[in-house]
Amino acid sequence: MPAEPHSKISAVILAGGQARRMGGADKGLALLGGRPLIAWVLDCIAPQVGELFISANRNLDTYRRFGYPVLPDTTPDFHGPLAGLRRAMTEATHPLILSAPCDTPFLPCNLVGRLAAALDETGADIALPVAQGQVHRAVCLCRQELLPNLEQFLDRGGRRVGEWQSAHRVAEVPFDDAREFLNLNTEQELALQEELIDKRQ
């Protein structure tokens, strides 16, 4: 059952990378079970938030067909997921921003609610999911007020997600199923999940 939407939370699905480990293909448009990877993520996240963006730097018209605003990075040369988050934070109308990569098709339907509850309970700046001891930093709920700090970090040449996050108060939120945060980074990983889906049908 989908979670209740959090009307004061914005989200951005990050599809703006170069996908080097997938041969440079536009990863968000790679098919899984006959559907683009990003469609899986959009279907999961859209019911949980009040506003949704897509971060993309290629195939912009194709991404616009999914029905959400498409935001290219404000800087050239593919500066990574934080550049996509930065652009979304400048456009967002809500005080909390969720970022999630386009290659995580199995995200849980209670993701946003649990991360938001952790921010409320702890007063932290950022909430991150943890499954089986692994912190999944690419899936991040943060406060929009962190934008000036993020801009400074990127303008100084910072790129690493973990480095930026570690400079703030972080709440780690445990989830039971590690598969929910599985990243499909290569064609082999995508093919394996395709086989698993076929076997379930």
Image (tube, rainbow, N blue to C red):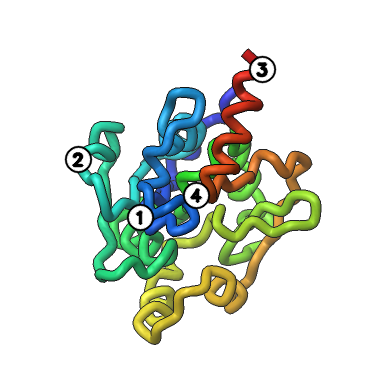
Asked which quadrant contains residue 124, the reply is bottom right
List x then y, in percent, for residue 22: 46, 51
Query: Which class describes the residues within 10 Å of circle 3: few (<14), some (14-19), or many (20+)?
Result: few
Q: Earlier in the sequence, mark 4 or mark 2?
A: 2
Q: Residue at x 46, y 45 (%)?
A: 102
How many marks the image carries: the answer is 4
Q: Amino acid at mark 2?
A: Asp
Distance of label 2 from label 3 (alpha carbons): 33 Å
Q: Earlier in the sequence, mark 2 or mark 1?
A: 1
Task: Give the labeled residue for mark 3.
Answer: 200
Label 4 to label 3: alpha-carbon separation: 26 Å
Q: Is residue 47 visible?
A: no
Q: Nearer the viewer, mark 1 or mark 3?
A: 3
User: Residues under labels 1 and 3: Cα distance?
Assistant: 31 Å
Q: Position of residue 191 (x, y in %)?
A: 56, 35
The type of residue carrying mark 3 is: Arg
SS class, disc 2: helix
Circle 2 residue: 61
Query: Which element type, helix, strand or loop, lies under badge 1?
Result: loop
What SS does tag 3 mark? helix
Residue 120 x %, y %: 62, 54
At 59% across and 38% down in the image, what residue appears? 107
Question: Which residue: 65% across, 26% down?
Answer: 196
Disc 2 crowd, CA 10 A, few/some/many (<14, 14-19, 20+): few
What amino acid does circle 4 point to? Ala
The Cα atoms of the two marked residues, 2 and 1, are separated by: 13 Å
Q: Which of the pair 132/171 is nearer the observer?
A: 132
Label located before the other in sequence (4 or 3): 4
